[in-house]
Image (cartoon, rainbow, N blue to C red):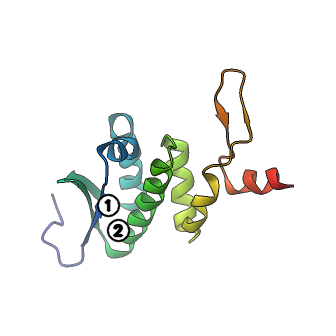
Amino acid sequence: MPGRYRSDTLEQRISIERLEQAVNIFGSFDENIRLLEQEFSVTVVNRDGELRVEGEPEDTMLACKAIQALLTLSSRGEAIGEQNVRYVIGLVRSGKESQITELTGDVLCISAKGRPIKPKTIGQKVQQKK
């Protein structure tokens, strides 16, 4: 891995409580974690019950914030998909990652197939309150 021995990289470690969370965050064929790696130019590895994020210091910190936000969603029973990942990346880049907790838990209604319908963005949540 190039850069492993460079002094200008940073490695952060994030503990994973349950294997299901790691599986949810990584996504099918690791598509979610690859998207994070591409967007933030970092490397993410799952080892010994923790995620190791390595890259440029600023990019690594942003990627860690995004992973923490995705862990929050996952721990509240949300399925993590590309839409969630892209939305979280946008929130992290704009410094609003703390708002991710506002999205979970609000079921607007139940569909005919019995699935819960929830707001997927902060804007939808605000519109729903009106």
Q: Identify residue for label 2.
A: 60
Identity of the amino acid at label 2?
A: Thr
97 sits left or right of 117 in the view: left
- Quadrant of the snapshot with the N terminus: bottom left
Residue depicted at x 52% and y 43%: 78
Q: Are marks 2 and 1 in contact (CB under 8 Å)?
A: yes
Q: Identify residue for label 1.
A: 42
Q: Can you name the residue that lies furthest to the top here?
A: 113
Q: Position of residue 105 (x, y in %)?
A: 62, 49
Residue depicted at x 49% and y 40%: 79
Q: Position of residue 23 (x, y in %)?
A: 34, 41
- Quadrant of the snapshot with the C terminus: bottom right
Q: Can you name the residue that lies furthest to the left here?
A: 5
Using a 10 Å C-alpha cutoff, classify the residue at mark 1 as few (fewer than 14 neighbours), some (14 to 19) or many (20 or more).
many
Mark seen at residue 100: none
Q: Can you name the residue that lies furthest to the right here?
A: 130
Q: Which corner quadrant of the image does residue 14 belong to?
A: bottom left
Distance in Å between CA atoms under marks 2 and 1 = 6 Å
Q: Which corner quadrant of the image does residue 66 belong to?
A: bottom left
**Of the pair 95 and 14, the residue shown nearer to us:** 14
Q: Can you name the residue that lies furthest to the bottom here?
A: 7
Looking at marks 2 and 1 on the same chain, the residue that comes earlier in the sequence is marked by: 1
Q: Position of residue 61 (x, y in %)?
A: 38, 71
Residue depicted at x 69% and y 46%: 119
Looking at the image, residue 76 lies above or below residue 27: below
Looking at the image, residue 22 lies above or below residue 69: above
Q: Which corner quadrant of the image does residue 27 belong to?
A: top left
Using a 10 Å C-alpha cutoff, classify the residue at mark 2 as few (fewer than 14 neighbours), some (14 to 19) or many (20 or more).
many
Residue depicted at x 33% and y 75%: 57
Looking at the image, residue 82 lies above or below residue 86: above
Identity of the amino acid at label 1?
A: Val
Identify the secondary structure beneath mark 2.
helix
